[in-house]
Amino acid sequence: MIADQRQNAKGIFLVVLAMSIFAVQDVLIKFLSGDVSLFQILFFRSTLGILLIIAFQRATGRSVKLWTAYPALSLVRGILFFLGYSAFYFAQSKIPIANATVLFLVSPFFITMLSIYIFGSSVGLRRWLAMLVGFSGVVVIAQPEAGEFDWLYLLPVGVAFTYAISMMIAKKTAEKDTVYQQIVVMYLITGALSGLIGILYGDGSMAEWGISGIEFASHPWRLDVWSTHLYLVAIAVVGTSGFILLTGGYRIADPAIISPYEYSGLAAVLVLGFLVFGEVPSVHDGLGMVLIVGSGIYLFYRERMQGQDNAAEATLR
């Protein structure tokens, strides 16, 4: 029992550290959004991430596998990953970073709902009410000061839904693929799609479409500025390190116990958002965050009580 408690304590520490690191990654991406193409960031993060994961596997004596036993499902998951995080980082460049982060945290609600239809899980009235309260937090946050609904706030929620589908696929492919195989294949697909966009529109020609507000996606790729390369390397190292730490936490500890601590990343984002961008949540933003995070933690608690850890088994990254 003491050993289990120690492992859980280590797992909690690793999760909190990982989520704080992910917050740094998100801040770096938002910081670059005014000058660097979104797809250039995704390409370098994916490519360097693969190399770092392979290096980590070799250093720890794990076998390196660059294929999957589920090519069709993995392709779907990789495309969802690419589309989802493209939308997330684009939204993050337009709205406060803490708002984008907390809106993505509704993903456990979608995971729980999808598990009903995919795995036949049962969900009681209390958990349905918790999810309803959580989604009400989305509505609260999506209302700007003028009281008009802003569609940009729906992007992180849409990402949360695609992420939930991705986690359902991950649960299936985990029967034969390791977690490192899964993430490498996702990075390969994301890198290939981002690279293709770079070949077609890396010269900035996407700006000729005349669509205002898409500068983050239409920036020409910058290959001659060394400071940009350093930032891209930092994003890849930070993001991959966060993934390895998060995976390590879930490997040594009880997922149902440590999963609620993933919400600690919101605190890091709030602090960094204020220090780097001067972002201060409004009263209704704060209320929405409380509703979403509180409902999510309660959902984890109820699933643990019912012995159904569908949301708890899926990391939020």
Image (cartoon, grey):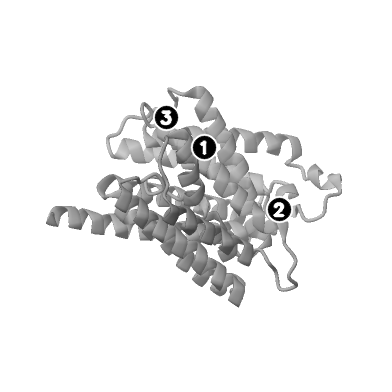
For badge 3, the amino acid type reads: Thr
For badge 1, the amino acid type reads: Tyr
Q: In the image, what residue occupies the spot 24% across and 55% down? A: 8
Quick one: label 2 or label 1, which is nearer the N terminus?
A: 1
Q: In the image, what residue occupies the spot 42% across and 31% down? A: 172
Residue at which label 3 appears: 173
Image coordinates of residue 199 in percent, x first then y, are 71, 35
Q: Any mark on residue 187, and which?
A: 1
Quick one: label 3 or label 2, which is nearer the N terminus?
A: 3
Q: Is residue 24 above or below residue 171?
A: below
User: Which tag is nearer the camera, tag 1 or tag 3?
Assistant: 3
Residue at which label 2 appears: 216
Image coordinates of residue 4 in percent, x first then y, are 18, 53
Tell me if label 1 and label 3 are in contact, CB under 8 Å: no
Disc 3 element = helix
Q: Is residue 307 above or below residue 286?
A: above
